[in-house]
Amino acid sequence: MKAIHGGKAKNDKVDAYKIAALLRGSMMPMAYVYPSETRSTRDLLRRRNHLARKRAELLAHVQNTNHQYNLPAIEKNLGKKGNREGVAKRFADLCVQKSIELDLGLIDHYDQLLHRIEHEISLIAKKYDADSYFRLRSIPGIGRILGLTILYEIHDIDRFPRVQDFVSYCRLVKCAKESAGKIIGSSGKKIGNAHLKWAFSEAAVLFLRRNPQAVAYRNKLARKHGAAKSLTILAHKLARAVYHILKRKEVFHPEVFFVK
C-alpha cells in the first residue's frame, strides 16, 4: 500500500482513500474470517504440534550427544518410553548423564501432556464434524493428528471454489516469476497455510508405509522427477484427494488415486 500511494503525507483520510481505491478496483482480496466457535480448538491443536516439535528436539539432542561422544548408535526407538531406560548410563561423564536425564524427564512429561491433549481434541472433533474426520482417516497415512490438523485448518472446504485454490492455500504449488516469457525466479512461497503444508508433507511420507502400491507409484514419479520432487508431487496429489473427498462427501478410493 505504501508503494501504491507514493506520497509523503499519511493520515486517516489518505489511508481511507487508498483502501477505497483498492476495493473499487478489486485489488484487495477479502480475507476469510475463521469462526470463533472452533478457533480455540484449532489454536489448541497448533499448540499441541508446537509441543510435539519441542519433544522431537529433545530426542534429537539425546542422539546428537551420543554421536558427539563417539558411542555406539542407539538402535532402539527412543520415542517409546520402554526404550529410554538406561540411556543416560551410556555416558561416563556425570554431567552428561544429568543432561540426558533432564532431556528424558522432559520427554516423559511431554508424553503425558500430549496424550491428554490428543484425547480431548479427538472427543471434540467427533462432536464437531465426525463425518469429515472419518473420511479423512480413510486415506492411508492420515491418522488422528494429521486428520485433526487438516480438518480444523480447512474448516469449510466450500470456501475454495476450485481445487487449484485449495492446493495453493496449502503451499503445494510452484511459485514462479515470469517476465517477457522468461522465468526470473520465484517468490511467494510463504503465502498460504504453513500448518497444512506440514500436514500434507507428513502425510506423503506416512502414505508410503506398508503400502506397496504407493511405493511403486512414488518410484515411478522419482524416475521422472527425482526423489525429492516425487514426495512434493505426492503431497500435492494427496491435497487434491482431500479436496474432492470433502467436496463430494466420499471416502478415499485407491483405484482413482493411482489412475495417473
Image: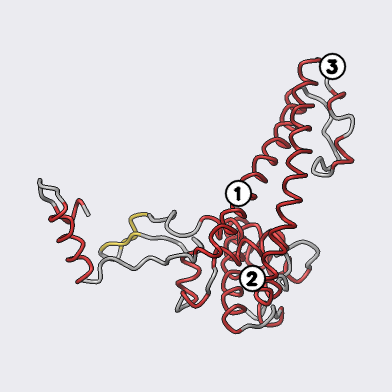
Out of 116 and 197, give the one closest to the viewer.
116
Regarding residue 224, the answer to whether it shows in the image is: no
Going by the image, does 23 lie left or right of 200?
left
Nearest-to-viewer mark from 1 and 3:
1
Do the residues under discs 1 and 2 have CB atoms within 8 angstroms?
Answer: no
Q: Is residue 59 above or below residue 91?
A: below
- How far apart marks 1 and 2 lie (CA) works out to 19 Å
Q: Report the residue at 54% width, 65% height from top.
A: 37
Query: What colour scheme has been applied to the protein in the rendered image?
Result: secondary structure
Dot 2 or dot 3, earlier in sequence: 3
Residue 148: which quarter of the image?
bottom right
Q: Which residue is mark 2?
A: 128
Asked which secondary structure carries label 3, the reply is loop
Do the residues under discs 2 and 3 have CB atoms within 8 angstroms?
Answer: no
Q: Position of residue 172 (x, y in %)?
A: 51, 63
Q: Position of residue 19 (x, y in %)?
A: 21, 61
The image quadrant where one finds the C terminus is bottom right
Q: Which residue is mark 3?
A: 92
Q: Which residue is mark 1?
A: 47
Q: Dot 2: few (<14), some (14–19), or many (≥20) neighbours within 10 Å?
A: few
The image quadrant where one finds the N terminus is bottom left
Q: Is residue 228 above or below residue 128?
A: above
Q: Report the residue at 73% width, 45% height from top.
A: 113
Amino acid at dot 2 = Tyr
Dot 1 or dot 2, earlier in sequence: 1
- Farthest residue in the left direction? 8
